[in-house]
Image: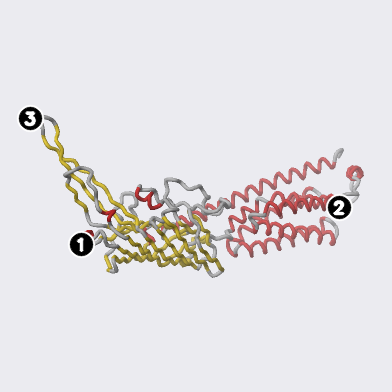
């Protein structure tokens, strides 16, 4: 062959291209498994309950105003009546919420879904009921108003296992629906008719819920003063919404958090009066958008502000496997470069087929990682896949390189690469910095190791037929 070095470089390039196709197919498989996990989450939400958003309690009253007016003149003059219907709404002056969310893991096949359940108590207080007194728009009109209703809106009422309520320390029956045109899902209670006769007196209402949901729990701070205390045994909370907790404690045994928001900082109470939308959107800190909980979009002005927490799984095997495959091509190139350096320094020829076998073993690592992580978790799966691939490559390198010492060095190098990959997967903010420094270090080591190599002599040696085949 006239140009053996060029031919071998072309063959190795073809091997790398083939490995890119293999890695692309593995990426497709990871995406498919992520889709199936999301489908499992949706299946549990359809059978149990979805992410929960609580709004209220709100005080409301339906009223009707009728008035008479004249139509026409002279003999054709006659009276007519018109009517308008309107709803009076009043957020509470003070709202205290105490919640406990116990993790309740559900499974669909191999896929785990983070659900929760627990007690939530909402204590609302109105200093007075003046906002429930209707105002006439037409002189001499006739006003009629129904009973005062206290409503509590819930994004998914299937999660309400039980509800009890008290008004002014007296137990009152709770009925389905909210009687609100915008926030239709939830429950309500009717205040006694005599209560409307005392608008200057304070009103205290308490709802006690046994609430279940999936993935997230949010509260709309629709009151002049809102305090929310939340406890859970889930060790991996992700706080979002428009307000982060004023206090929070996160341990391996769970977390506790407390929010304190006033109407001076939040527009939720005012937006409820204008019937803003209850949106099931988790707005949190910027992170990877492939975490299974959607992106972190900016707050939609049409949506009510929320206090929110997501019950996430930071060791999501599909997210971490997808992240790992992004480094796959780089690791294959680095491995091939290491083998090429051994060829140059030890004057040992390696056939492109052997490059291909080494590359395929590196690619299969990610397939092993994906399949094992679904059964034993990502950490143990990574360890097993690493040991298996390092042992295989070390054994093969002993024959490929013709030296046990070179094979040990090669195996240590592969193990170091997998160790580096593990470090990069665990890092988020400093992954780019660490990766850049390590790549620079590897390049520096390669330049130092080959600083005395006569590359013209290497090219010449490649023109001489090999006296011994390495196959």
Q: With 453 as the anchor, is 196 left or right in this view?
A: left
Sort mark 2 into few (<14), some (14-19) or many (20+) by Cα contacts within 10 Å.
few
Residue corresponding to mark 3: 75
Q: With 279 as the anchor, is 387 left or right in this view?
A: right
From mark 2 to mark 3, how far is it between C-alphas? 113 Å
Residue corresponding to mark 1: 194
Mark 2 / mark 3, whichever is N-terminal: 3
Query: Residue placed farthest to the bottom in the image?
Result: 253
Residue 113 percent across, percent down from the top left = 49, 60
Using the rendered image of the protein, determine whether residue 400 is visible from the camera's viewpoint: yes
Q: Residue at x 64, y 62 (%)?
A: 381
Using the rendered image of the protein, determine whether residue 111 is visible from the camera's viewpoint: no
Quadrant of the rendered structure where residue 66 is? Answer: top left
Q: Nearer the viewer, mark 1 or mark 2?
A: 1
Q: Secondary structure at mark 2?
A: helix
Q: Are marks 2 and 3 in contact (CB under 8 Å)?
A: no
Q: Nearer the viewer, mark 2 or mark 3?
A: 3
Query: Residue placed farthest to the front in the image?
Result: 200
The quarter of the image holding the N terminus is top right
Q: Secondary structure at mark 3?
A: helix
From mark 1 to mark 3, how far is it between C-alphas? 47 Å
Disc tally is 3
208 and 1: which is toward the camera? 208
> Coloring scheme of the render?
secondary structure
Residue 23 percent across, percent down from the top left = 66, 49
Sort mark 1 into few (<14), some (14-19) or many (20+) by Cα contacts within 10 Å.
few
Q: Are marks 1 and 2 in contact (CB under 8 Å)?
A: no
Residue corresponding to mark 2: 449
Mark 1 / mark 2, whichever is N-terminal: 1
Placement of 193 over or under 21, stated as above or below: below
Q: Secondary structure at mark 1?
A: helix
């Amino acid at each position: 062959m006239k140009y053996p070095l060029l031919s071998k470089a072309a063959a190795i390039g073809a091997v790398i291209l083939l490995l890119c196709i293999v890695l692309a197919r593995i990426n497709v498989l990871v995406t498919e498994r992520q889709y199936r996990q999301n489908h499992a989450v949706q299946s549990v939400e359809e059978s149990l309950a979805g992410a929960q958003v609580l709004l209220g309690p709100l005080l409301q009253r339906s009223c009707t105003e009728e008035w008479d007016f004249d139509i026409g003149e002279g003999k054709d003059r006659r009276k007519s009546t018109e009517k308008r219907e309107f709803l009076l709404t009043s957020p509470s002056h003070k709202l205290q919420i105490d919640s406990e969310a116990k993790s309740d893991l559900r499974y669909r096949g191999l896929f785990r879904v983070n659900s929760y359940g627990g007690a939530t108590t909402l204590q609302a207080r109105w200093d007075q009921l003046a906002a429930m007194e209707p105002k006439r728009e037409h002189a001499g009109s006739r006003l009629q108003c129904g009973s005062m209703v206290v409503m509590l809106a819930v994004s998914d009422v299937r999660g309400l296992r039980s509800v009890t309520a008290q008004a002014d320390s007296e137990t009152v029956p709770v009925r389905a629906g909210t009687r609100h045109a915008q926030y239709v899902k939830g429950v309500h209670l009717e205040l006694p008719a005599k209560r409307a006769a005392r608008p200057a007196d304070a009103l205290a209402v308490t709802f006690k819920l046994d609430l279940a949901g999936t993935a997230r729990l949010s509260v709309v701070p629709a009151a002049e003063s809102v305090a929310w205390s939340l406890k859970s045994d889930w060790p991996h909370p992700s706080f979002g919404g428009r307000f982060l907790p004023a206090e929070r404690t996160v341990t391996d045994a769970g977390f506790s958090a407390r929010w304190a928001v006033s109407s001076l900082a939040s527009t939720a109470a005012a937006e409820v009066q204008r019937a803003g939308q209850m949106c099931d959107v988790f707005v949190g800190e910027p992170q990877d958008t492939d975490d299974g909980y959607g992106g972190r979009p900016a707050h939609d002005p049409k949506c009510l502000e929320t206090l929110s927490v997501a019950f996430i799984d930071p060791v999501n095997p599909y997210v971490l496997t997808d992240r790992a495959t992004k480094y796959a091509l780089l690791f294959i190139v680095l491995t091939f470069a290491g083998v090429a350096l051994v060829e140059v320094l030890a004057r040992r020829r390696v056939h492109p087929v052997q490059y291909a076998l080494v590359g395929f073993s590196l690619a299969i690592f990610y397939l092993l990682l994906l399949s094992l992580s679904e059964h034993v978790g990502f950490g143990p799966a990574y360890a097993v896949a690493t040991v298996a691939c390092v042992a295989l490559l070390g054994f093969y390198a002993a024959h490929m390189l013709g030296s046990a010492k070179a094979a040990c060095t090669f195996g240590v190098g592969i193990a170091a690469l997998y160790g580096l990959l593990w470090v990069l997967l665990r890092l988020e903010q400093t992954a780019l910095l660490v990766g850049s420094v390590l790549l620079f270090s590897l390049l520096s080591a390669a330049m130092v190791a080959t600083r005395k190599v006569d590359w013209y002599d290497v090219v010449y040696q490649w023109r001489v037929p090999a006296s011994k085949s390495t196959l």
